Image (cartoon, rainbow, N blue to C red):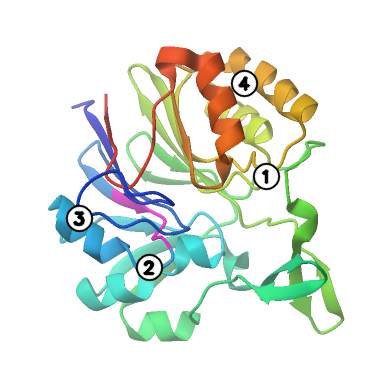
């Protein structure tokens, strides 16, 4: 079985080259094991323009994965479906919740900017999973990630609007994508709302494999206090990471700290970045 892996970042907060656009969002294309899987879709403005600029072919997508139900990961689905109708879309059923963020006492809607019915009319075929699901040989979506005590920056500002009012949103819909390779596990993260270290520990337990070779995506380490970040960096070194390409919600201070710790194993990850194994 061919073991070549190619991951292309299509949407990210920063643009990595001429004719590319940046937006607050994330989308990565995984090509491996004969499968082509789009992990998240960005916020909606940059996916298709960047796909065109990068000359990426999405005609033969096997699936779209939505890591969780925030607009900056799901907003690109409507334009994608208009261009490529009839797509299989994997997501946790809780992505459809009315998700808000509180800032300075003001609640702002940050959930999916579309309805399930609307997307199904456009051709989306939703496959909703709470448990792990295999997307192809050696390619797994984690399902909901059990929580432990780990501070996730900003988590106290996420809420769900319910009939009883605003309640804390623990983002149980957060999932990660895992690829088994000859070098070790390759992990794609949307925002790691379940906690970065917690997510990696769960993936170890889920797969029965200790070695996590590469980690790419959002890690939600922004706004951590120095000591909190130091503790996480210390724990990360236990996973034996050989490639780490954090982006999106990681935050610049945390990216700089990760670069200092992982040195040549740290990779800049922007719209247009490509990673190959």
Q: Residue 244 at what x, y percent from top left?
A: 46, 26
Range drawn in magenta: 37-42
Q: CA distance from mark 1 to mark 3?
A: 34 Å
Q: Earlier in the sequence, mark 4 or mark 3?
A: 3
Q: Residues within 10 Å of mark 3 (few under 14, many from 20)?
A: few
Q: CA distance from mark 2 to mark 4?
A: 31 Å
Residue denoted by label 3: 19
Q: Is residue 106 left or right of residue 204?
A: right
Residue denoted by label 1: 194
Residue at 55% over, 58% down: 68
Q: Is residue 245 left or right of residue 108?
A: left
Q: Residue 192 at what x, y percent from top left?
A: 60, 43
Vertical order, 202 against 241 (above or below): below
* Quadrant of the image containing the N terminus: top left
Q: Earlier in the sequence, mark 4 or mark 1?
A: 1
Q: Earlier in the sequence, mark 2 or mark 1?
A: 2
Q: Residue 76 at what x, y percent from top left?
A: 37, 68
Element carrying mark 4:
helix
């Amino acid at each position: 079985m061919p073991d070549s892996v190619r991951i292309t970042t299509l949407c990210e907060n920063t643009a990595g080259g001429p004719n590319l656009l940046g937006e607050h969002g994330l989308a990565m294309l995984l090509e491996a094991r004969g499968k082509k899987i789009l992990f998240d879709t960005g916020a909606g403005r940059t996916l298709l323009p960047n796909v065109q600029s990068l000359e990426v072919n999405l005609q033969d997508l096997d699936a779209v994965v939505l890591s969780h139900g925030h607009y900056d990961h799901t907003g690109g689905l409507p334009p994608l479906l208009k261009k490529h109708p009839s797509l299989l879309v994997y997501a946790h059923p809780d992505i459809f919740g009315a998700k808000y963020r509180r800032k300075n006492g003001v609640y702002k809607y940050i959930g999916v900017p579309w309805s399930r019915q609307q997307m199904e009319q456009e051709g989306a075929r939703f496959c909703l999973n709470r448990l792990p699901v295999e997307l192809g040989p050696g390619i797994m979506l984690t399902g909901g990630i059990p929580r432990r005590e780990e501070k996730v920056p900003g988590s106290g500002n996420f809420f769900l609007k319910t009939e009883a009012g605003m309640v804390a949103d623990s983002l149980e819909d957060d999932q990660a994508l895992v690829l088994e390779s000859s070098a070790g596990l390759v992990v794609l993260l949307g925002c790691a709302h379940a906690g970065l270290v917690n997510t990696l520990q769960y993936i170890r337990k889920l797969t029965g494999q200790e070695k996590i070779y590469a980690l790419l995506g959002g890690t939600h380490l922004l706004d951590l206090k120095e000591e909190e970040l130091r503790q996480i960096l210390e724990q990360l070194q236990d996973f034996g990471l050989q490639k780490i390409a954090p982006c999106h919600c990681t935050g610049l201070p945390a990216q700089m700290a990760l670069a200092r710790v992982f040195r040549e194993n740290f990779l800049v990850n922007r719209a247009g970045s490509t990673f190959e194994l």
